[in-house]
Image: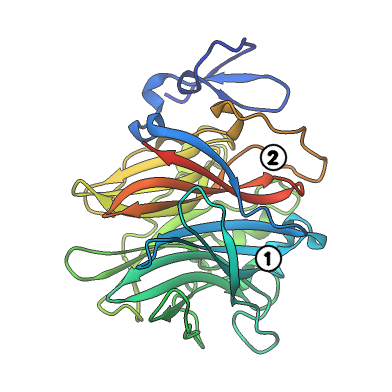
Amino acid sequence: MLARRTFLTGLLLTPFTRALAGFAGRLIDYPKADFAKFSKHLKPVGRALELPDYYVWCNSPIYGPDGKVHVFFSRWVASKGMGGWLNGSEICHAVADKPEGPFAFQEVVLAPRGPGYWDATTCHNPSIQFVDGKYCLFFMGNSNGKTDTKRIGLATAPSLNGPWTRPEAPLLLPGPAGAWDDHCTTNPAFLKHPNGQYWLYYKSWNTGEYEEAKGKEIRGNRKYGLAVSDKLEGPYEKFAGNPVIDFSKQGNNKQFEDAFVWRQHGKFNMLARDMGVYSQEVGLYLESEDGKTWTFPKIAYLPIRDYGVTEPPAPPKLKRYGRLERPQLLLRDGKPEYLFCASQGGKSMTASAFILKVS
């Protein structure tokens, strides 16, 4: 099913019959059946939030009551390099009159609090939601600048302009030693279930597998679990059938991350970044009837260059140049209007938002 034929090609192939697998012109021919319908409705808008001297990541948009588009995003100083997200990221707020921008920086919403706090060294992975009459900013923090203290938290505010009530404790903790999710909780994806419950999807992996994989390009196997609560602020109880999404049995350490979840047409829908199911270059689309059993993914989106966007050559410091990560949707009445992603590159050759319109 996942066998692929590689070949060199000219410029006549459309994005929906192929995807780039590398930077040297080698292409992968994906059958049309591998593409989700979602993928055929994307048109590139371009980059946004290109901030001098910063890497910008995790761009989460929402319409405000003012009719403007508010984006909550991560940034860290360029001197830290791409890895600075883990030990120096802060979450910021920007506003634009329309989804295409330009966006005006407003403020730093959440910054690392320093020694003694669970979010001492980074604040990352923002996902903004409007729930029960208030704004909810799900995010990840850590306390030691490493992956093993990554924890999901929830800050709330009556307005997109704050004031934000910051959590003194994480919203969700890892599992016990030896569990599939004993390493961390991160990449929050949230929705309120039609039955009134609060559903929180989270990424994690096993510490033992992670430690055994030292020296490998990808350490451990990332899976997704589900936690459910009767109250927005928790406590959240982990679903007994976790992990709800696990590609490890596909072989070759296939996995995924960066999930975004929404409900439409009576189904649960998910976007995510592929980590080997098809390739490292594409996004994934999954569906579920109950939010627990998910379809095998199809391709949701392609690298920037497959949309006819020409960018300068990649500098050596950017190893993920050209691909789209951290997919987040701008929804209107529950329907996707724009796809906001993060991508290395931009004017400062760091990282910025990249926006695609959903037609």
Q: Position of residue 22 (x, y in %)?
A: 67, 28
Question: In the displayed structure, would residue 310 be above or below residue 317?
Answer: above
Q: Amino acid at mark 1?
A: Leu
The residue at 32%/40% (across/down) is 295
Q: How is the image coloured?
A: rainbow
Q: Splitting the image into 4 quarters, where does residue 33 fall?
A: top left
The residues bearing labels 1 and 2 have C-alpha atoms spaced at a distance of 19 Å
Q: Residue at x 61, y 56 (%)?
A: 57
Circle 1 crowding by C-alpha within 10 Å: few under 14, some 14–19, many from 20 = many
Q: Residues within 10 Å of mark 2 (few under 14, many from 20)?
A: many
Q: Amino acid at mark 2?
A: Tyr
Query: Which disc, if any, is residue 291?
Result: none
> Is 283 drawn above or below residue 54 in the view shown?
above
> Which quadrant of the rendered structure holds the N terminus?
top left
Q: List x then y, in percent, for residue 226.
A: 36, 63
Out of 355 and 10, give the one closest to the viewer: 355
Q: Residue at x 63, y 77 (%)?
A: 111
Q: Looking at the picture, how far across and down is residue 334, in whole percent?
A: 28, 53
Ranked by sequence position, the earlier of labels 1 and 2 is 1
The mark found on residue 86 in the picture is 1
Which SS class for mark 1? Answer: helix
Percent from the top left, x then y, of residue 287? 30, 44
For marks 1 and 2, give the one nearer the viewer. Answer: 2
User: Going by the image, does 195 lie left or right of 311?
Assistant: left
Q: Which mark is residue 321?
A: 2
Q: Is residue 58 left or right of residue 261?
A: right
For the C terminus, the quadrant is top left
**In the image, residue 93 above or below residue 298:** below
Q: Are marks 1 and 2 in contact (CB under 8 Å)?
A: no
Secondary element under disc 2, as helix, strand or loop, is loop
Left or right: 83, with 138 as reference point: right
In front of the other: 179 or 292? 292
